[in-house]
Amino acid sequence: MSAETTVIGVPDFDRVLLGEGGTQACLLDVRNPIDALRWRPEGPGIEGYANVPYFDFIDDEDEAFERVPDASLYYVLCAKGQSSDYVAGLLRDRGLHALNIEHGMNGWAAYHRAVRVSDSSDGFTIYQFARPAKGCLSYLVVAGKEALLVDCSRYADVYRAFAEQLGVRVVGVVDTHLHADHVSGSAGIAKELDAPYHLADEDAQGSALDRVAIPRSFELEDVNVRVLSIPVPGHTLGSTALSVGDRYLISGDTLLPDGVGRPDLGNKAREWTGLLYESLHDVLAKLDPRTLVLPAHVASSKQYDDKGACVRQLGDLLSKQPAADREAFLEKVSSLVESTSQPPEYAAIRKVNLGEGAAAKIEELEIGVNRCALVGAES
Amino acid sequence: MPVPETVDEVLDASGLQCPLPLAKTAKALNGLAAGSVLKVVATDEGSVLDFQSWAQGSGKCELLAQEKSAGDDGKTRYIHYLKRK
């Protein structure tokens, strides 16, 4: 790093968070304490953290500096990247090594990391897009020159640019279920790319969305790869997992790295928990336990591997389920539901995703990491 | 809290991004006598929470009121009333 470097772009900062930098650095968060408490970037590459608002530096610089922990390197964060630029400059004036995180939390919230998660021997390629600020994962399945997009965030440009760069045509866009934690971009990008948007009938709930049901299978590039749809109701009634080439399972929120998708979003928790149990026990448990699960979410940055991807073996995840016995499962899940509150903004997000809610204030709705998982007792 | 009836000075921070609205406000307050009221007009939405947090922790001023109105250019104005301590 040259002596003149004063700023770090979000993709480079993401690599730092994943631990690629080696140096244990301090994240200096100069936002107001209310915003700072709501969400912030996290990862094994950051050792120290302090929230010292930029206005404290304006008020009394020396006093503010007393609250800056010792570190060999500081990454300075604010909402948009301007106040942090000012504070990073103050740190450098005092001989400290400080980099401003470009575009701040706005940049971080929009950032997507693309990692190839399939093997070169598969004959097809699956890319996982992680949106680390939200813990949302989406997928691009590519065979030859055709591709299927799954669970897109509202940042459609990310996927469009990626597909363009690969030179592939998106032939379908699928939401594995009606999302409640983030605003879906799937319907929008499908329209832009003139591809069908797929969402299960049960989840579309008779809305006016321009969509078609999820077919039994998708055939990419003349059956070079077959993507089979597997209904797995529970988290939502229309939840659908996608089996790719019999080796990978895009699991939506049904099966997550640390548990199962919460079955209480329809306010019929008891009934849907039974469905969830059947989906796990009677459907997914019948698949090869070595199947590689590609979930729709991570709950923490610790669930990424060193490449920044999240892939789990089906057998491992099933063995961590709340309980193997039906009655015990119902009981365990219902107590988890009671102790894991549903964020109040989820109802509004679902409306937006059904094409019904106003799109205003989407940034506000999306603040905070997803809370889709009920964390299993074993994990 | 009600908007104060009299204002001693007005600072137009429209079009400025943080940290400037708050930095200019701090500077303007320094030039005011104790008890004076400063009205700050900003377009940066982030200023709402920032001014609240700042006034709470700062010994220099008290936040009397905040309001929102539409400017002539169609952009929302965030207006803050601060009393110099």
Image (cartoon, helix red, strand yellow):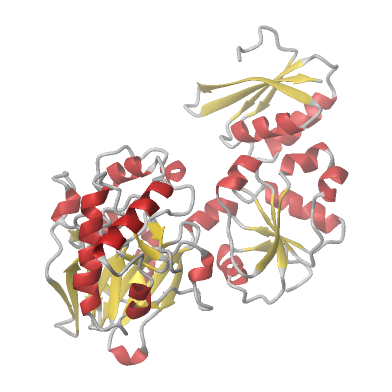
Q: Quadrant of the N terminus of chain A?
A: bottom right
Relative image position of residue B10 (x, y in whole percent): 70, 19
Relative image position of residue A350 (x, y in whole percent): 30, 45
Residue located at (79% from left, 64% from top): A71
Residue located at (42% from left, 39% from top): A361
Name the outermost residue toward the top: B5
Residue A116 visible from this viewpoint: yes
Relative image position of residue A126 (x, y in whole percent): 33, 78
Q: Is residue A213 above or below residue B59?
A: below
Image-based side of A75 in relation to A230, left or right: right
Which one is nearer the viewer's eye here, A355 or A309? A309
Name the outermost residue toward the bottom: A121
Relative image position of residue B29 (x, y in whole percent): 80, 25
Residue A340 visible from this viewpoint: no
Q: Is residue B81 above or below residue A199?
A: above
Q: Looking at the image, how many numbered discs can be counted on the residues?
A: 0
Image-based side of A269 in relation to B27, left or right: left
